[in-house]
Image: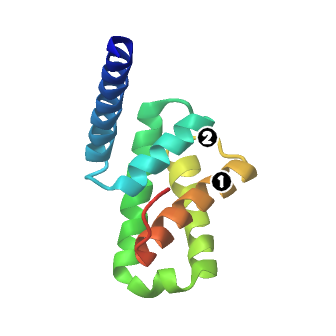
Amino acid sequence: MVANIAALKCIDARARELERKNQLLRAKYANDAKYARLHKRLLENGEPTPNERKLFEALCSLKQELDAKISENSQLLTNPAYTEKMVTRLIIEQLQNKHSLPLTPDGCRFINHLVMKEYLDERNGQQPA
């Protein structure tokens, strides 16, 4: 029983630390959980860079541009095919051209898939898995 309690306390401490780190990351993106999740997934894959600072700067400018486009036309997300092409252009423009991050076609598709999933899930009111 004593060993189990000690193990549970250790698990609880790790969970609290992970939650603290997640909250700090979310705060960096103005409490936008979509981009905190996107940041974490991209770092896990090393796409397009393992450098956390560069990734943060690139995602911030992508967020700013994409949020502005969606604010201008709230119906964008009702046409996923068009939005996906627009997001691809923004990813290339922001990550590769503006922030000089190396993008492969597969990497661009992967990022696009993650971004589209986050925005569509948010629009449809779905909670992340």
Residue 3 quadrant = top left
Image quadrant in which the N terminus is located = top left
Instruction: Please tell me which residue is depicted at 74% across the width and 51% down the height of the picture.
Output: 106
Judge whether residue 100 can be spotted in this image: no
Q: Position of residue 4 (x, y in %)?
A: 38, 18
- On residue 110, the disc is 1
Q: Position of residue 113 (x, y in %)?
A: 62, 61
46 sits to left or right of 69 = right
Instruction: Please tell me which residue is depicted at 52% across the width and 60% down the height of the picture.
Output: 115
Front-most of residues 12 and 45: 12
Residues at marks 1 and 2 touching, judged by CB atoms closer than 8 Å: yes
Q: Position of residue 10 (x, y in %)?
A: 34, 19
Q: Which residue is mark 2?
A: 47
Instruction: Please tell me which residue is depicted at 50% across the width and 56% down the height of the picture.
Output: 129
Within 10 Å of disc 2 (Cα), the crowding (few <14, some 14-19, many 20+) is many
Instruction: Indicate whether 74 appears above or below 53.
Output: below
